[in-house]
Amino acid sequence: MCGNVGYIGKQKASAIILEGLKRLEYRGYDSAGVSTLNAGRFELAKKVGRVDGLIKETGASRLPGTTGIGHTRWATHGGVTDANAHPHLSSDQKFALIHNGVIENYAAIKKFLLGKGYTFQSQTDTEVLCNLIAYHYQKEPAARDESRFLESVRKSLRHVEGTYGIAVMCADTPAEIVAARKGSPLILGVGDGEYMLASDVSAIISRTQNVVYLKDGEIVHMTAANFTITTMDAAGVSPVIDKVTWNVEDAELGTYAHFMEKEIFEQPAALENSMRGRFSEDGSTAQFGGLNLTPGDFRQIDRINFIACGSAWHACLVAEQLIERFARVPVEVDYASEFRYRNIPLSRSTLFFTISQSGETIDTLAAMREAKRKGYKVLAISNVVGSTIAREADGGVYQHVGPEIGVASTKAFTSQLLLGAMLALYIGRMRDMSFSGGVELVKALKAAPDLVRETLKLAPQIQDIARRYAHYHDMLFLGRLNLFPIALEGALKLKEISYIHAEGYPAAEMKHGPIALVSEHCPSVFFVPAGEMLNKVVSSMQEIKARKGRIIAIAAEGAEIPAGLADELVRIPDCHEAVLPIIATVPVQLLSYYIAVELKRDVDKPRNLAKSVTVE
């Protein structure tokens, strides 16, 4: 949550920072602010609302100075007010600070600082940290002025419990920024005579593609001429400069109205990128270069545990079914937020997988660390090169779908579905899946991008349906087997961006309670496959219809549905069972999107949500 941007160089800092904040606004949009250093004093502008409002109402882009920091907030401590917006200044006006994360022991620190005469203008934990830095700075010997700023930050962070990605400026040293991270992402951009900081590469990609991914416990000290990285113990760190493989155009809207729309229609290409180079030459299996386990290791596995949050958790549920189906390995799926607080019996031969688009989801990261602490191998599926989860995992797979800006995941989710199916193939071929079975599944997976292209042609029909159903206040999503998780995902998408109450259930579970909700005022979205589940699903549809419920059916071409049973019928291409969840996802993405547009919701920035969840 929250977006940090910092700049130090020769250019006007405020304009560069505000451009970066606009690119990070999906990380938090309760309020925004920017501060620059000019002639030894802080220039400050902050405002509740969006970055455009900050620019318009405060003239933030006109702030002078070539050193500055900026922030877009997703509120944790304290309400959404101008006073609680970042940056925060210390009560002695010596420091300005921005922060992503949560300082868990802020109350005790605040009590201590109040006793020392420090005052507070906000309700935030961030202002407490800013004043703590001021306190340690005042205590530092004057003889160490050359490192006084840096050491004050270092000493303060040793007293902090919780998570942080921070950037700090000091009025006494106007050409310096100190930044640090623990549990919240922070990236250093290395430019030509300038340096930038950001929570996400998208904020700095317009100025440089050379970045350093800071690790937990690292502190970077920047001037316009150079930077150094040290640990909390002041040990030097040799930086590794990586090159970002995508460019600024990938994070632009282009001709689309919203990033969510753009990312829905990017899915065929995203799927192609996810599978590129990952099938064997004989076309019988998948291949992954970064898992760091041998075929013998995979044959010894007797259980797989997936840990994830949100849409990624739904993708894990599909992977569970496919791996058990094709690889014959028992699979468990845990909410990452619950995993480390449970005492789960685990066999010695359990393999863990984490799935996180950002690679920074704090609950997933904590769960991964707990599994590793217990001596288990943990592999990761992530979309962000250099992310914390990607670095700390024992191996993994990058999704390669490009930046996903819309808060509601679309192309990252279908890529996760694809990679889950490819893992089922990969592990299955190492165990008891035949060559011909592998060839069949590879052929089906390779067909997925074109099937998605075909499904996207249904957009006008789905838009018409959305107009007819946008006024409903409740909706049910129903599926069976590997389409049940897609029912969960469809309900989540509708809730996220339209604010309509929606629930996902296994279709057969309706009669065990949820059917009480059914009426002419509560439509149901059914996923209707061809094959053995068809008659069962049709029977559930009949139960809904008998109670005057309206039905939107998303049905495979080969699924025969009695005339008049569905009020709306969306036909998707027939396909292999491993690919069906991917194809079935697209119509509900479009349905949710068009309903949200019809209701004039802020599709890319839905209320109360942010893209990357970096607080517990």
Image (tube, helix red, strand yellow):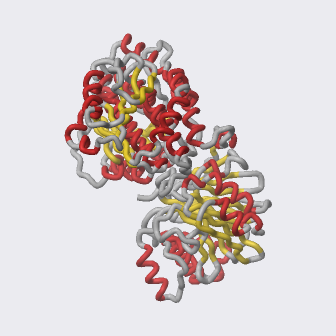
Position above or below: 141 against 4: below
Q: Judge by depth and name the residue closer to the eye, 169 or 152.
A: 169
Residue at 59% across, 78% down: 90
Q: Quadrant of the C terminus?
A: bottom left
Q: Is residue 115 visible?
A: yes
Does residue 243 appear in this view?
no
Report the residue that reaches farthest toward the left: 512
| In this view, 260 is above or below 184 | above
- Residue 183 locus on image (x, y percent): 47, 57
From the top left corner, tell me how far across and down residue 484 is, in percent: 33, 34
Q: Quadrant of residue 480?
A: top left
608 vs 305, left or right, is right
Q: Is residue 168 above or below residue 7?
A: below
Please provide percent x and percent y for residue 548: 30, 36
- Give the farthest residue toward the top: 436
Q: Quadrant of residue 349?
A: top left
Badge count = 0
Foreground residue, 556 or 22?
A: 556
Q: Is residue 598 left or right of residue 561?
A: right
Nearer to us in this view, 255 or 282: 255
Q: Residue at x 51, y 39 (%)?
A: 467
- Where residue 479 appears, x then y in whole percent? 32, 32
